[in-house]
Amino acid sequence: MMDLIDIDIKTLRNAFETGEITSYQLVIEYFKRIAKYDKSGPYLNSVLEINPDAIDIATAMDRERAQGKIRSPLHGVPILLKDNINTKDKMHTSAGSMALKNNYATYDANIVSRIRDAGMVILGKANMTEFANFTSYEMKPGYSSRGGQVINPYNKDFNPRGSSTGSAVAVSANLCMVSMGTETSGSITYPAHNNSVVGIKPTRGLVSRYGIIPISTAQDIAGPIARTVSDAAELLNIIVGEDKEDPSTWAVNEYIPTDYTDFLINDGLKGLRIGINLGYADDYSEEQIGIANKAFQIIRDNGATTVGNCNLPHLKCDRKVLVYEFKQCIEHYLSTCKDIECKTLTDIINYNNSNPRVNLKYGQTRLLDAEYNTSGTLTEPIYLLDRIEALRISREDGLLKILNSNDLDILVSPGVYDASPISGYPSIVVPAGYTSDGMPFGITFVGRPFSEPLLIKAAYGFEQKCNARKPPKLV
């Protein structure tokens, strides 16, 4: 049996073609690893639910391959989905909440339909921060009342970060090939950064939000999490495109290239003009900034021109917007569900109160804020003005101002930068190294709307020269 540790999709595809491994065998091997490392041993707790049909789907994909039917370059490739992504099958979609523990989705999310059509094998659902970290201001990253605490595979004491925690940990620990995460404000990029994997936060509108348990109309998006830029680009190919159910995606097809992997260029940094953003360097230790500076030197050494003093601090201008939008968003989603107790935000709060020992380890202060301080109609003047202000600060007076005034192709930052989710502009986080205690650290490339090809080109060029990722040592 081939070694699964950090293999990429290209290697796997060749193995499928030569018969070295089948999709069925691969699913079996991932089940073994999940049993050994996720549900025992270090007990990473990144997988919330297994798809009971995964083995049958893999077997069917093997039969199709034998008959000469290849649905896509990712035919037979196993994937985990974050637990807030609808699957109309035998799995629940709960966003990690006990209040939605009995929710069987009545329809597939648009991205799930695309994943199925591509012949990918859905292994199961990944654990996550409950309601994508919109339950409580005090909730620990990676915790859900339904799934418990996700553990960082590099050290149980390290913060796994973000809400797509299980999705990132499972990929990093080689429990699946790739995964899907979702992001409202850093929930793809933060867990990718803290668990030494690649995360792509696409341009808002490039990927449909339909069928994903929401937080915010303004900022929600789904995106790939993978061990390499190339694998993330391959998955991005599958999930992008217009969807009549999601207005943000209308008329975006002209911005989508034939194949994002065309931009996996070894010298992809050559000739680019890249701004260095150290506007929030105080968030990080001297050692972490040292890793970032080495990364910036690699960028320069490989043909890019870097421009200093392109600084933007963390904007933190979206918090009221998210609170006001959550009630409207979650109650619309609940209206599409059947056979569940909770049909309103009030119902969820009351359900949690009915068993606080299980449901309210960290309280529900965010839910209470949204329930009692917003109308759910989005008519409050403070919401309308704050949403407009957030767009201005993050776009015209933020990223676009920095990019345009310095004639930049891309802005690069240490760690993760919040201007990308607030503006809706794309970003990619790539591993850059580790601190002396083994904590992963990455850098983030941010660009203009629909500049994913350019970001992939730069991120891949950096990844090939830096080659920083090391798989966690699991025992």
Image (cartoon, rainbow, N blue to C red):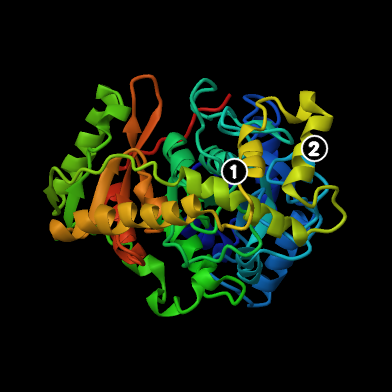
Q: Is residue 316 above or below residue 459?
A: above
User: Which residue is at the front of the view, 302 or 76?
Assistant: 302
Q: Residue furthest right?
A: 339
Q: Which mark is residue 350?
A: 2
Name the residue at 35% across, 49% down: 419
Q: Which residue is mark 1?
A: 132
Left or right, 284 with reference to 368: left
User: Which residue is at the front of the view, 282 or 124?
Assistant: 282
Q: Is residue 398 visible in this depiction of the protein?
A: yes
Left or right, 5 with reference to 424: right
Q: Residue furthest front?
A: 381
Q: Is residue 182 above or below residue 252?
A: above
Name the residue at 33% across, 46% down: 444
Q: How far is disc 2 from disc 1 in space, using C-alphas?
A: 19 Å
Left or right, 10 with reference to 287: right
Q: Amino acid at mark 2?
A: Asn
Q: Is residue 119 above or below residue 174?
A: below
